[in-house]
Image: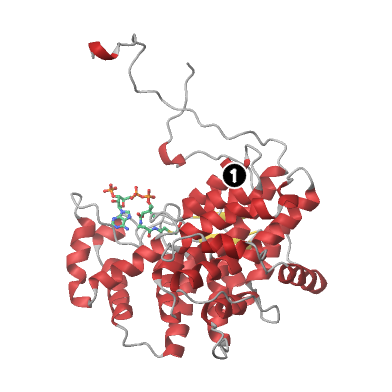
Amino acid sequence: AGVFTYDPGFTSTAACDSTITYIDGDKGELLHRGYPIDQLAAKSHYLEVCYLLLYGELPSAAELEHFESTITRHTMIHEQMHNFFRGFRRDAHPMATMVGVVGAMSAFYHDSTDISDPRQREIASHRLIAKMPTIAAMAYKYSIGQPFVYPRNDLDYAANFLHMCFAVPAEEYVVDPILARAMDRIFTLHADHEQNASTSTVRLASSSGANPFACIAAGIACLWGPAHGGANQACLEMLKEIGTPDRIPEYIARAKDKNDPFRLMGFGHRVYKNFDPRATVMKQSADEVLDLLGVENNPILATAKELEQAALADPYFAEKKLFPNVDFYSGIILEAMGFPTSMFTPIFALSRTVGWISQWKEQLADPQMKIGRPRQLYQGETMRDYVDIENR
Ligand code: CMC
């Protein structure tokens, strides 16, 4: 039988070597290829961080220009995929649509399903990073019954995404640079987070040699859950349910009650037990966006601010080291920008695509790579004889 270490939730199992992202949860440190996330969020931008994650170093000006023009060239999706979108129910959740459409990319881009060819792996990476915003925006437009908006390659990555989500053929839409910057920050802060559940899912799927689009679709499926990427949607829905600050004590009491499964969404993290460095930057960004949009009196925001203070002051949360995480603030920003809650997780998915792809690429190049195959501690019946149906 063999002796196996029981490690539910893999809290103490390292499943791979990696050089991409470093996290020190106690110190609240997050580094991509050695660079701290707060410096990247302040001085860099999403596509540069994509380059860093994929290739290991910051690009020179020429390398960055080349990378950006390569990504821009791939922003459109195959026209036939529009028909594929139309097969979904009109009110489908955009995450459901994205799992399907990204998985279906393998049926549209056969050439880059060949993972034995490094050039095809490269093209698959670029296609995924470039097309994900288009796919997410199309999933959104479809869910609200508006026409698809084609990408505009004169806009940068984040501005183009806002354009594809909010432009309509009937009138001109001008992207506000402060909103584009906040969008870019959300993408940057979610770009990678080492071996979280969805990234581990991508690695496990890819360990069998599955094609990149199938692996990323598996990552999207895993991300959707409320304990992971779905937390930003769940957090905003919780704030709406609380409604006004006077109801906060009731919800805090529920979160502390062991007989109540309710948890404060947007609080706590498996790895960060003091603070989430992404949350610090996201909080600043939330303040900027809310100043711009003049929504200081928004009851959701007032509730969010008081909930944050009330939880931080409560010994239960302090003892268990539960602090607001990145999704607590990103949800507030996306709400203020006008995104419905159903788009929060698709935006996380498109931001995380580069992380998934970088980890996929790293795994394929790893000489120690094996098919992922955890073992189990069997707790079921010992061997027994089959009983015919009339004797049961
Ligand atoms: N509200 C109330 N109690 C909580 C919460 C919460 N949000 N989070 C954890 N606890 C309690 C939990 O009940 C447990 O108590 P006890 O030790 O008495 O049984 C203790 O804190 C430890 O919790 P855990 O579930 O063992 O911790 P974990 O590391 O497995 O879970 C988590 C981490 C993020 C899943 C969890 O904190 C949670 O469910 N948070 C709410 C959902 C959320 O915001 N998720 C987003 C995570 S960040 C983005 C991402 O990575 O996708």
Rendered position, 287 above or below 69 = below
Q: Is residue 52 left or right of residue 42?
A: right
Q: Is residue 63 left or right of residue 17?
A: right
* Residue 327, percent from left and from top: 42, 66
* Residue 288, percent from left and from top: 47, 84
Q: Is residue 19 visible?
A: no
Q: Is residue 80 left or right of residue 28?
A: right
SS at mark 1 in the image: helix
* Residue 233, percent from left and from top: 39, 65
- Categorize mark 1 by other alpha carbons within 10 Å: few (<14), some (14-19), many (20+): many
Query: From the Cβ of disc 1, is ligand 1 less than 8 Å away?
Result: no
Could you say which is closer to the camera, residue 164 or residue 169?
Answer: 169
Residue at image mark 1: 203
Residue at x 35% of width, y 69% of height: 236
Residue at x 34% of width, y 21% of height: 380
Could you say which is closer to the camera, residue 390 or residue 333?
Answer: 390
Residue 332 sits in quarter? bottom left
Q: Residue furthest top?
A: 385
Residue 40 sits in quarter? bottom right
Rendered position, 26 above or below 117 = below
* Residue 338, percent from left and from top: 43, 80
Residue at x 82% of width, y 72% of height: 62
Q: Amino acid at mark 1?
A: Arg
Could you say which is closer to the camera, residue 145 or residue 77?
Answer: 145
Q: Is residue 211 visible?
A: yes
